[in-house]
């Protein structure tokens, strides 16, 4: 087997998620939910507000009440 046609080995680089929190995140608190909703309403971003409300209603990230 000829080795002249093999691709060069890339230099190692750090992982894209190094130092970040991985896995399940903590649930949102009600004050954070309302802060996000208010910002979306002020920005008149109706699409993202609807998607955010749907995500909260379906408990994608359970809110601690």
Image (cartoon, rainbow, N blue to C red):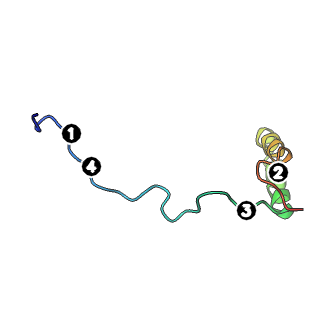
* Residue 59 in picture, x, y percent from top left: 82, 48
Cα–Cα gap, marks 2 and 4: 47 Å
Q: Earlier in the sequence, mark 2 or mark 4?
A: 4
> Residue 42: which numbered mark, if any?
2
Q: Nearer the viewer, mark 3 or mark 2?
A: 3
The reply to whether dot 3 and dot 4 touch (C-beta < 8 Å) is: no
Cα–Cα gap, marks 3 and 4: 37 Å
**Residue at left 85%, top 64%?**
31
**Residue at left 68%, top 59%?**
25
The reply to whether dot 2 and dot 4 touch (C-beta < 8 Å) is: no
Label 1: element kind: loop
Q: For the residue carrying disc 3, how many other residues have a C-alpha within 10 Å: few (<14), some (14-19), or many (20+)?
A: few
Q: Earlier in the sequence, mark 1 or mark 2?
A: 1
Q: Earlier in the sequence, mark 3 or mark 4?
A: 4
Cα–Cα gap, marks 3 and 2: 26 Å
> Residue 7: which numbered mark, if any?
1
Label 3: element kind: loop
**Residue at left 20%, top 44%?**
8
* Residue 5 in picture, x, y percent from top left: 14, 34
Q: Which residue is mark 4?
A: 10
Q: For the residue carrying disc 2, how many other residues have a C-alpha within 10 Å: few (<14), some (14-19), or many (20+)?
A: few
The reply to whether dot 3 and dot 2 touch (C-beta < 8 Å) is: no
Q: Nearer the viewer, mark 1 or mark 2?
A: 1
* Residue 27 in picture, x, y percent from top left: 77, 60
Label 2: element kind: helix
Q: Quadrant of the C terminus?
A: bottom right
Q: For the residue carrying disc 1, how many other residues have a C-alpha within 10 Å: few (<14), some (14-19), or many (20+)?
A: few
Q: Which residue is mark 3?
A: 26
């Amino acid at each position: 087997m000829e080795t002249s046609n093999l691709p060069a080995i890339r230099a190692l680089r750090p992982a894209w998620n190094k130092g970040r929190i991985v896995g399940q995140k903590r649930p949102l608190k009600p004050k954070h939910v309302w802060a996000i909703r208010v910002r979306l309403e002020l920005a008149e971003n109706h699409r993202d507000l609807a998607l955010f409300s749907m995500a909260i209603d379906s408990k994608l990230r359970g809110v601690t009440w």
